[in-house]
């Protein structure tokens, strides 16, 4: 399993979308929030960052996670959530 920070340094992802220690990444686009984390190697700082992101977008409950099976992030879990439109 490759570290998310190394992917950012290689320019493969936007470093602004990842947690401080590289254990989580979030993308928000077209009303969908996709959050991924490395469940076996999550620091308290990264966990707090991800909780703050969920709170900022009004996510109060998570469904069971899915898992990435292949590629650079194999083994990471993820959630894909439709965001509520307040307008």
Image (spheres, rainbow, N blue to C red):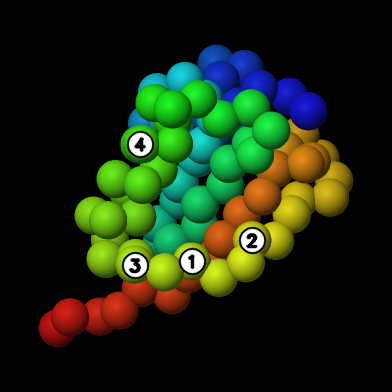
Q: Which of the numbered marks, if any, corresponds to residue 62?
A: 1
Image coords of residue 21 (percent x, y): 47, 20
Quarter of the image for residue 70 reads: top right
| Quadrant (top left/top right/bottom left/bottom right) for the N terminus | top right
The residue most toward the left is: 87
Q: Mark 4, residues whose alpha carbon is within 10 Å: few (<14), some, or many (≥20)? A: some
State the residue in front, 71 or 74: 74
Image coords of residue 44 (percent x, y): 44, 27
- Decide if residue 37 is in sight here: yes
Which residue lies under the disc numbered 3?
Answer: 60
Element assignment for label 3: loop
State the residue in front, 75 or 26: 75
Q: Mark 3, residues whose alpha carbon is within 10 Å: few (<14), some, or many (≥20)? A: few
Mark 2 and mark 1 residues within 8 Å of each other at the beta carbon: yes
Q: Which of the numbered marks, if any, corresponds to residue 49?
A: 4
Q: How many marks?
A: 4
Residue under the point 54% across and 65% down: 80
Residue under the point 70% across and 43% down: 76
Which callout, 4 or 1, points at the residue further toward the start of the chain?
4
Q: Which of the numbered marks, if any, corresponds to residue 65?
A: 2
């Amino acid at each position: 399993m490759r570290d998310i920070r190394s992917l950012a340094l290689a320019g493969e992802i936007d470093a602004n979308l990842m947690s401080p220690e590289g254990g989580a990444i979030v993308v928000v686009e077209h009303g969908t929030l996709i959050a991924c984390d490395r469940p076996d190697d999550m620091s308290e700082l990264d966990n707090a960052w991800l909780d703050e992101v969920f709170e900022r977008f009004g996510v109060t409950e998570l469904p069971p996670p899915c898992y990435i099976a292949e590629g650079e992030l194999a083994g990471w879990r993820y959630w894909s959530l439709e965001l509520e439109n307040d307008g």
